[in-house]
Image (spheres, grey):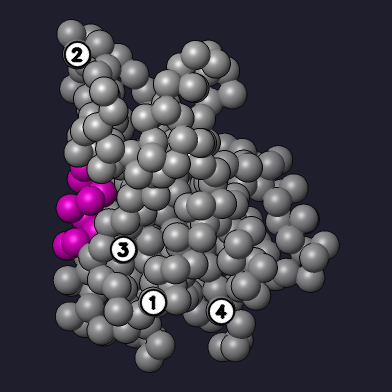
Amino acid sequence: MSDRKVALITASGKQRIGWHVANALARRGYAIAVHYFQSATEAAETVALFQSQGIEAVAYQADLRDESSVHALVDGVLERFGRLDVLVNCAGIWDSKKLEQVTAADVRHHFEANALSSFLCAQRAGLAMVKQPEGGCIVNIGDWAEVRPYRDYVAYFMSKGAVHSLTRCLAVELAARNPRVRVNCILPGPVQLPTDMPEAVRLEVVAATLARREGSPNHVAQAVLAFIDNDYLYGTCLPVDGGRTVYAPD
């Protein structure tokens, strides 16, 4: 087993939250397992970038909704590196639809992509971590607005609410098997607004934060590092939202 710590970050091929988390961990000296579903080109570019900086990195394709695919992903990382110290579940989808139009298929689609995928990855990785004397750290990604949801996102927020519960359940389950395995969750706010968002809407979103500014994916990455560094945090769901959770603008 290598002395270099290893991190698996789902959905880290494209330059979204997962990519920034992977980059922060790479700068910490971690070997990086870059997961992608369909973004093979972007994942290869990410791996090449890390390798050019002297960072050990490998790309893995997996459909995180499929149990056997997740098992192959986690087992492949363990076979390649001999250990797994950090898992960050960044994969997810969000689609808007009027309540009258939401179908059972929509709910299942969001649940599988957001909640089931996080469970399958954390289950497989967590049960491997409990066998390691040094344990490991799992960080899920939820959403601050699961407790104050927007309209037209009912399927999405149902699935993200499940991630909150999943975090607490797995924190209990895995720590009971090895107290050095910790599970926590980050609840991002406006850290990466859509590039096509109208300026008036963007200003409204920013004004609804105490920070009065948009955050960035790096704020999420910094929170991941904080969870890794603080070994007395278990089952914590941390808003990284510029104060949006506690602020009720007029």
Residue at label 3?
184
Residue at label 2?
99
- Residue drawn at (27%, 56%), measured in percent from left and top? 237
Q: Name the front one of labels 1 and 2.
A: 1
Residue at label 4?
5
The picture places residue 172, in percent across and down from the top left corner, at 17, 71
Whether the residues at callouts 3 and 2 have beta carbons within 8 Å, the answer is no
Residue stretch in magenta: 161-169
**Picture quadrant where residue 30 is located:** bottom right
Question: What amino acid does circle 1 point to?
Answer: Asn
109 with respect to 201 (left or right)? left
Q: Is residue 127 above or below residue 20?
A: below
- Residue drawn at (38%, 40%), measured in percent from left and top? 210
Give the residue furthest to the top: 100
Whether the residues at callouts 3 and 4 have beta carbons within 8 Å, the answer is no
Q: Name the front one of labels 3 and 1.
A: 1
Q: Which sits in the foreground, 62 or 161?
A: 161
Q: Name the front one of labels 3 and 4.
A: 3
201 with respect to 27 (left or right)? left
Q: CA distance from mark 3 to mark 1?
A: 11 Å
Label 4: few (<14), some (14–19) or many (≥20) C-alpha neighbours in 10 Å: many
Whether the residues at callouts 1 and 2 have beta carbons within 8 Å, the answer is no
Callout 2: SS? helix
User: In terms of sequence position, does the residue under pointer 3 or pointer 2 come before the other?
Assistant: 2
User: Which quadrant: the N terminus?
Assistant: bottom right
The picture places residue 59, in percent across and down from the top left corner, at 63, 56
User: In terms of sequence position, does the residue under pointer 2 or pointer 4 come before the other?
Assistant: 4
